[in-house]
Image (cartoon, grey):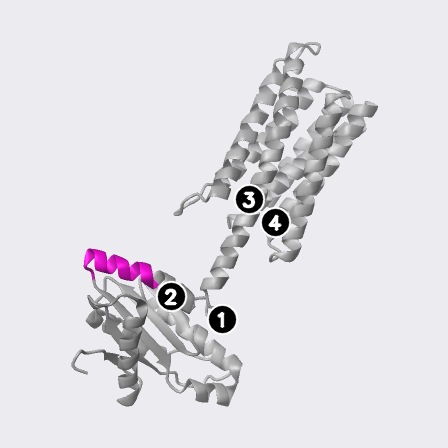
Amino acid sequence: MDPVIIIIALLIFTSVIMALAMGVAWLHFGRQRHVRSWALSYVAATGQWLANAGGAALGSGGLMALTSCLIVVSASLMLVGVRQRSGKPVPWLALILCGAVVAAGGSYVALIGDRSLQGIVVPSYVGLLMLCSAIALWPRNRRFSAPDMAFFSMSLILALFEAGLVASAATDLGRAPGEGMALYRALLGLGLPSIYVGLGVAAVMVVAGDLAHQLRRQMRHDPLTNVLNRRGLDESASRAIAHAHRHQRPLALVVCDLDGFKALNDGHGHIAGDAALCGFAQLLTNAVRRGDIVARLGGDEFGLLLVETDAAAAADVMERVRAEIGCLVVPNAPEAALRASFGVAELLASDQSLEDMVARADTALYDAKKEGKNRVAIWRAAA
């Protein structure tokens, strides 16, 4: 059997599998834009390899021209998906204009049968797009995850591979096909299948890694306020407490809730109550530093873990929050005046878990409620 047929069949099969995998991931796991772009990229790639097979078998310049156009579309959509996932703007106008020019050039050289130019025009553009994809994948202010590293590496390898194809095709310019195109065909047959499959596997790893991260986040975060839930607080607190004990640094826990929250819910409905909780959570998040922890414990009760902070400093921070909460405007209940009470407890040498601190902070919160609400209370040993 002709090795070319085997290689193209493998590439068609890989493209179909990847298009199906990305399509299923898009339909059932959040309908993310970048996954849809990658699914469409592999759909275009499937058409590309089918047209390539037909063009090679029939000697059709028209099918080879179609192949060039679909290669441009597939590579462009791959870059679009990478930038969408990275949260970067997609230069649609530049991609469309440059892609149209390259597709037209690739189609022309395919129709006139110039194999050397055909091996330069489109691979140059694809290599540039894959290099841009690798650059867009480079993380800022965070570490490379294993799937990101795999995808970055395969994108860079594909960019270098396309550069090798261009260099080998360039050696055949201006003369009859000879050693240059032989090298081109050898590189294409030996390198492309493994690199193409590797890039597809890396893309699947990225999507699976994103899904796993999304599930972990849902398990640790409150869906309404987008702060940590009790489970997330427990996990973070265990590390913070161990660090504070090990380095003998202060650590403060604040337990707080909205005064009269039940009356707000009963009088104005749960939509107003949810808006009040979201506003309170945002106010707490804005009041603390980057390394501090904010969590919703349940209902209208929140917990804050303030690192490198003693009880007095934590109380000062909460006093500012208490003063600012009256300025919050609740949709559907603009006349409602929000108030909150706070209980503060500091880490003791005998504390082994978050529960030890929660018990004392709850006692301080109870004291704040008993003394008239809308105040900050610090747990004292004498109490």
Q: Residues within 10 Å of mark 3 (few under 14, many from 20)?
A: some
Q: Is residue 166 left or right of residue 266?
A: right
Viewer-side label of 1, 3 = 3
Start and end of the magenta stretch?
A: 237-249
Q: 130 left or right of 323?
A: right
Q: Earlier in the sequence, mark 3 or mark 4?
A: 4
* Residue at 32% over, 75% down: 255
Look at the image and tell me in which quarter the N terminus lies. Answer: top right
How many angstroms separate mark 1 from mark 3 (CA)? 29 Å
- The residue where tag 3 is placed is 205
**Mark sitting on residue 233:** 2
Mark closer to the chain start, 2 or 4: 4
Task: Identify which amino acid the numbered label 4 is placed on.
Answer: Val
Disc 3 versus disc 4: distance between alpha carbons? 12 Å
Q: Residue at x 32, y 71 (%)?
A: 355
Q: CB under 8 Å between callouts 3 and 2?
A: no
Q: Nearer the viewer, mark 1 or mark 2?
A: 2
Q: Nearer the viewer, residue 280 or 300?
A: 300
According to the picture, the residue beneath numbered tag 4 turns out to be 35
Do tag 3 and tag 4 residues touch (Cβ < 8 Å)? no
Q: Is residue 162 left or right of residue 265?
A: right
At which x and y percent is residue 298?
43, 75
Would you name the residue on which mark 1 appears? 224
Q: CA distance from mark 2 to mark 4?
A: 31 Å
Magenta region's main secondary structure?
helix
**Marker disc for residue 33:** none
- Is residue 377 in the magenta section? no
Q: Looking at the picture, which amino acid does disc 1 mark?
A: Leu
Give the amino acid type for the residue marked by disc 2 in the picture. Leu
